[in-house]
């Protein structure tokens, strides 16, 4: 078919999309009472304004990238941006849509600062952890799926991937033990999903994100402590020591190596902690000073789901 065929105008298409540079038309105050063409003209005008602002926002991000901050991806800052916008959100647009738009935008502004790439531990390529990673880091961000957590972590260590997306720690998913012994260190920096209100069909798994740079605080965070203890230590005793040190434990994963006298323990506590937090020196039962394996911004809709 020839390219010269003109589109057939329908009776509602009087308002053609505004051409570049021609979007200065003032808003018609009477758009509410206008027909479809008037309403669409108003939408085109608003779209141009949003687009102009997005381009301006990207220019500011270019300057932020040159500010000397430790890494392109700052998940704590991203969490605080989304929380703030949800607080001021009004009207009919579903809050979940607002979050989706900003997740894609932040993936774009992170990748424009030098590339964002994901190494996902997903033995069933394309299954839940890949979907969670896409939900958070954008639908077209480069992603490699691996059969093991060790492979995904190796990509981050070698600088092949910016972040690894790994199953939430358990006594079966034991990749977290390597974070307690590895030099140079890797850090837990985020938890997925950030939007915890799961609609039908959304992946229900929980994951952590690991990177080579430490996390940034978002104002409402949780941290992971990595401990080494005698293998006969009880959870009750450890919890008591943590509470006495003013640390509120939430999740505790204990890994007793078969036949070993030492257990590795991962404990989630409230707040954003760093390695030099004085409370870490107050735990009597540990064999060496605990390390902070990382922290994450508490997800929306409840930290634990
Ligand atoms: O504030 C920063 O550090 C930025 O790089 C800007 C920005 C943003 O677009 O707002 C982009 C990526 C980061 O992960 C967080 C925020």
Image (spheres, rainbow, N blue to C red):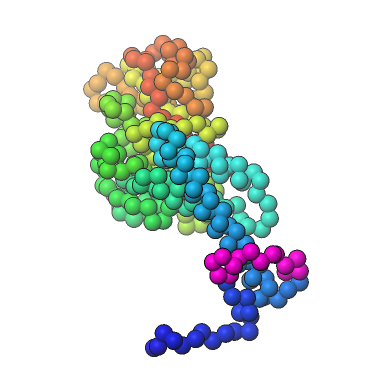
Q: Which segment is the magenta one? A: 18-31
Give coordinates of residue 266: x percent, y percent: 39, 27
Residue at image position (46%, 88%) is 5
Residue at image position (50%, 15%) is 245
The answer, for residue 147, to whether it is visible in the render is yes
Residue closest to the eye, 206 or 140 = 140
Tell me which corner region of the image, top left, top right, bottom left or bottom right, holds residue 284: top left
Q: Is residue 27 magenta?
A: yes
**Residue 244, above or below 210:** above
**Residue 269, above or below 10:** above
Is 49 left, or right, of 139 in this rendering? right
Q: Is residue 87 magenta?
A: no
Count of numbered tags: 0
Furthest toward the left, the residue is 259
The answer, for residue 237, to whether it is visible in the render is no
Tell me which corner region of the image, top left, top right, bottom left or bottom right, holds residue 156: top left
Question: Where, quadrant-wise, is the N terminus in this rendering?
Answer: bottom left
Give coordinates of residue 31: x percent, y percent: 72, 69
For the stretch drawn in magenta, what is the main secondary structure? loop
Is 137 left, or right, of 218 in this rendering? left
Residue closest to the eye, 99 or 265 = 99
């Amino acid at each position: 078919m020839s390219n010269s065929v003109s589109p057939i105008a329908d009776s509602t298409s009087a308002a053609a999309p505004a051409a570049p540079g021609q979007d200065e038309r003032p808003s018609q105050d009477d758009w509410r009472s206008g027909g479809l063409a008037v309403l669409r003209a108003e939408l085109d005008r608003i779209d141009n304004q949003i687009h102009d602002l997005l381009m301006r926002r990207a220019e500011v991000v270019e300057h932020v990238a040159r500010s000397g901050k430790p890494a392109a991806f700052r998940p704590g800052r991203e969490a605080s941006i989304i929380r703030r916008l949800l607080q001021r959100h009004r009207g009919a647009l579903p809050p979940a849509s607002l979050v989706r738009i900003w997740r894609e935008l932040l993936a774009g502004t992170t990748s424009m600062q030098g590339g964002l790439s994901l190494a996902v531990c997903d033995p069933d390529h394309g299954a839940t952890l890949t979907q969670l990673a896409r939900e958070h880091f954008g639908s077209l961000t480069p992603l490699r799926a691996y059969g093991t957590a060790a492979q995904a972590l190796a990509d981050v260590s070698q600088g092949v991937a910016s972040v690894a997306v790994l199953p939430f720690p358990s006594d079966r998913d034991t990749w977290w033990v390597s974070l307690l012994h590895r030099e140079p260190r890797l850090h837990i920096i985020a938890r997925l999903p950030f939007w915890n209100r799961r609609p039908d069909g959304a992946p229900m798994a929980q994951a952590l994100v690991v990177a080579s740079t430490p996390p940034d605080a978002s104002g409402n965070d949780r941290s992971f402590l990595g401990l080494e203890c005698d293998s006969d230590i009880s959870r009750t005793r450890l919890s008591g020591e943590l509470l006495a040190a003013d640390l509120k434990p939430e999740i505790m994963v204990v890994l007793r190596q078969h036949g070993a006298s030492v257990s590795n323990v991962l404990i989630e506590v409230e707040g954003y902690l760093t390695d030099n937090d004085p409370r870490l020196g107050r735990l009597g039962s540990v064999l060496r000073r605990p390390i902070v394996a990382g922290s994450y911004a508490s997800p929306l809709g409840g930290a634990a789901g």
